[in-house]
Image (cartoon, rainbow, N blue to C red):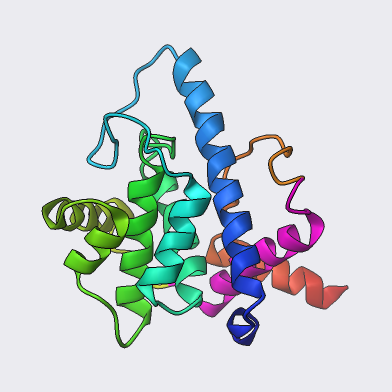
């Protein structure tokens, strides 16, 4: 998508995406504390919260991964799919960083003609190559190997992000109450497109 090639769009997209993931993480952390039933522990869960913020981590990935800007939108789609297919593994502050590096790496491998190997992504993400390999495998199985993102789905997710980026100012991103990640599937996207055409 040509809009993503604009140099001013990516910093804003990264800021909003990281803010969204931080809100979801914080919300799920609160839910985790008050939940009576236990949530599953996965390979994505760290023993402690990483000291780097989600925003700084995503900026680091953007700086060093050299993947196409579309990879970040597709990574967002993958994270949404993963959380819906694995409801016992919600995004929280213990797993968001590992989920991010894995989703960006998988999207780069699927979308881009040239991409780095797992050892490089592991170094960017601050984890071992062995762990990166395990995360990739678990992520792919968690997605059911459903990696294809249709143009309608891509457009729906990107439109949502773009709309939110224009509505929210950087300072107010922190003040927005937590909410879950927006979900679209191909049917919803085509239905919304039909509704827009009807208007």
Q: Is residue 95 visible?
A: yes
Which quarter of the rendered picture does the N terminus lie within? bottom right
Tell me: 77 left or right of 126: right
The answer to whether 13 is drawn above or below residue 151 in the figure is: above
- Prevalent SS, magenta region: helix
Tell me: 87 left or right of 47: right
Residue 141 percent across, percent down from the top left: 23, 54
Indicate whether residue 79 is drawn in magenta: no
Tell me: 144 left or right of 87: left
Q: Quadrant of residue 60?
A: bottom left
What range is drawn magenta here?
149-171
Residue at image point 59% right, 48% down: 20
Indicate whether residue 161 is drawn in magenta: yes
The answer to whether 11 is drawn above or below residue 39 in the figure is: below
Q: Quick one: 47 or 60, which is closer to the camera?
A: 60
Residue 59 percent across, percent down from the top left: 48, 61
Q: Is residue 147 visible?
A: no
Tell me: 105 left or right of 175: left
Residue at image point 38% right, 64% down: 104
The answer to whether 20 is drawn above or below residue 145 in the figure is: above
Which quarter of the rendered picture does the C terminus lie within? bottom right
The image shows a total of numbered marks equal to 0
Residue at image point 59% right, 84% down: 5
Q: Which residue ends up furthest to the right in the rendered image?
A: 199
Residue 176 percent across, percent down from the top left: 73, 39
Residue 123 percent across, percent down from the top left: 24, 60
């Amino acid at each position: 998508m040509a809009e993503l090639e604009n140099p001013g769009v990516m910093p804003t997209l990264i800021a909003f995406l990281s803010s969204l993931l931080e809100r979801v993480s914080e919300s799920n952390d609160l839910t985790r504390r008050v939940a009576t039933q236990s949530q599953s522990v996965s390979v994505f869960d760290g023993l402690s919260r990483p000291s780097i913020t989600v925003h700084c981590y995503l900026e680091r990935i953007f700086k060093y991964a050299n993947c196409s800007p579309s990879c970040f939108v597709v990574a967002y789609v993958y994270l949404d799919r993963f959380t819906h297919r694995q409801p016992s593994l919600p995004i929280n502050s213990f797993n968001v960083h590992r989920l991010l590096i894995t989703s960006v790496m998988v999207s780069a491998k699927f979308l881009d003609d040239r991409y780095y190997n797992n050892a490089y992504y592991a170094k960017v993400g601050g984890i071992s190559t062995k762990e990166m390999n395990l995360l990739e495998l678990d992520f792919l199985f968690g997605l059911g190997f459903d990696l294809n993102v249709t143009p309608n789905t891509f457009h729906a997710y990107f439109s949502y992000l773009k709309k939110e980026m224009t509505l929210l100012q950087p300072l107010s991103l922190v003040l927005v109450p937590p909410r879950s990640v927006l979900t679209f599937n191909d049917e919803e996207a085509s239905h919304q497109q039909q509704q827009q055409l009807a208007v």
